[in-house]
Amino acid sequence: FRALCTKDKLLAAFGQRPVRLSTANTYSYRKVDLPFQEYVERLLKPQDPAALGSGRSRATGPRGSRRGPAPVTGPPSPADTLYFFGDNNFTEWGPLFQNYVPPPFRIPGTTGAYSFGIAGSGSGVPFHWHGPGYSEVIYGRKRWFLYPPDKAPHFHPNETTLAWLRDTYPSLLPEERPLECTIRPGEVLYFPDRWWHATLNLDTSVFISTFLG
């Protein structure tokens, strides 16, 4: 699977296929469709630390709020922190996923659904939660920040993880800091049900998550 995920192999197989991009904010409410090759050539680059997660003005919802604006679509703005993760077309990307061997761990009564992603350094998703699953890095490094369900993190839902790490993280008291780790190629992280987590890609990264439901 790793051999099929090099830049050259992916562009040769999927360069003209459309991919759906999401903004790097808690709600991922902005969706943009682009050919995969255009995403790689135009948007797969280090993230601007000053950019908001949605490429727009700050949201007005409460900190840690789960709800957000309705999805919208439109052409990308230079300020958007658009990245490719999830929203995969399983018909078009099926030949690639067929070669993936998921982690040999299971929760009884669940089945796995894949979310494949490619993103530039400094990108990532701010704090959010969902059901349990696994995350594996194919290329690059991904830093994780996690809080248990009963300990909501201090963050703004429209602030990128990179901005949070720069502006909020240094001022956290020891008891306020999250659990942390960095996973590398071939390593897998299990995220439990309803745990808050944020991610930060330290390099241009290729990764895949298996959501259990």
Image (spheres, rainbow, N blue to C red):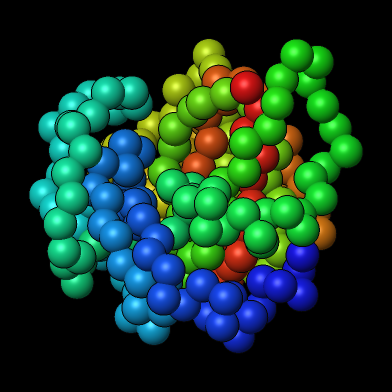
Q: Quadrant of residue 27?
A: top left
Would residue 137 be seen by someone viewing this image from the given angle? yes
Question: Is residue 17 left or right of 151 when viewed as pictured?
Answer: left
Q: Position of residue 193 (x, y in %)?
A: 62, 21
Q: Quadrant of residue 110?
A: top right
- In this rendering, the answer to whether 108 lies above or below 111 is above
Q: Position of residue 178 (x, y in %)?
A: 58, 36
* Residue at x 45%, y 23% (from the top left corner): 152
* Residue at x 81%, y 59% (from the top left corner): 186
Q: Quadrant of residue 103?
A: top right
Q: Position of residue 90 (x, y in %)?
A: 54, 49
* Residue at x 16%, y 64% (from the top left corner): 75
Judge by depth and name the residue closer to the eye, 110 or 99: 99
| Outermost right residue | 104
Judge by depth and name the residue closer to the eye, 112 or 166: 112
Q: How many marks?
A: 0
Question: Is residue 68 left or right of 112 when viewed as pictured?
Answer: left
- In this rendering, the answer to whether 103 lies above or below 35 is above
* Residue at x 67%, y 54% (from the top left corner): 97
- In this rendering, the answer to whether 133 lies above or below 35 is above
- In this rendering, the answer to whether 88 lies above or below 109 is below
Would residue 166 be seen by someone viewing this image from the given angle? no
Give the quarter of the figure containing the C terminus: top right
Give the quarter of the figure containing the N terminus: bottom right
Q: Position of residue 179 (x, y in %)?
A: 65, 37
Judge by depth and name the residue closer to the eye, 207 or 123: 207
Question: Is residue 143 left or right of 155 when viewed as pictured?
Answer: right
Judge by depth and name the residue closer to the eye, 177 or 116: 116
